[in-house]
Image (cartoon, rainbow, N blue to C red):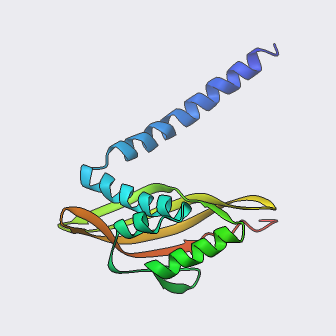
Amino acid sequence: MSLQLPIALAVTFALIFSPYVSIVRAQQTSLTSDQKQVVDTVSTIFTAARADDVAKFDSVIAPGFYIFDVGARFNGDTIMALIKAQHAAGKRYEWNVTEPDVHINGNTAWIAYVNKGSISDASGTVNQNWLESAFLEKQAGVWKIVFMHSTRVPPPTQGK
């Protein structure tokens, strides 16, 4: 009897979650080549920022790039300086582009996505999500980020 319950639960979970996993995979694989390049460009900005790699960061931004984040406007140099200062203070960030919604019109594109990640320091790691968007231009055949916007999703309130 005790073996039947775990098997029944496993079958139930498989039936419930299999369609969801298939839908997520279908959404990810249904991106066109250009849409994948847009997602990869945004992902590269995060890889560069995590490693304090200014050259890599600069390779994916357009001249005049800026971002609205933490309630302020930053250009490429000032956002990288802020991130480097956070790293020096012991903070580490994990950023991931998930649920991308990519729209392309000629040599322009915009993407909205959920940035699912975390913030770590000496006290531990806190999972964090951000709602983000970016506007890109294709320059000499390469997607460059012109503008980004980031809004931190507040943690759930207790008791709700």
Instruction: Name the residue rendered at 63%, 28% in the picture.
Output: 12
Instruction: Name the residue rendered at 56%, 36% in the picture.
Output: 17
25 over 80 or under it: above or below: above
Res. 50 image quadrant? bottom right
Instruction: Name the residue rendered at 36%, 60% in the picture.
Output: 41
Residue 153, given in percent of the width and then of the height, sits at 62, 69
Residue 48, given in percent of the width and then of the height, sits at 48, 62
Instruction: Name the residue rendered at 55%, 59% in the picture.
Output: 95
Viewer-side residue, 124 vs 8: 124
Q: Quadrant of the N terminus?
A: top right
60 over 8 or under it: above or below: below
Viewer-side residue, 67 vs 157: 67
Q: Residue furthest bottom?
A: 72
Viewer-side residue, 99 vs 20: 99
- Please give the count of numbered marks on the rendered protein: 0
Residue 160, given in percent of the width and then of the height, sits at 77, 65
24 over 114 or under it: above or below: above
Residue 19 lies left or right of residue 101; in this view the side is right
Residue 63, given in percent of the width and then of the height, sits at 31, 79
Res. 3 image quadrant? top right
Res. 151 image quadrant? bottom right
Residue 129 lies left or right of residue 90; in this view the side is left
Viewer-side residue, 135 vs 158: 135
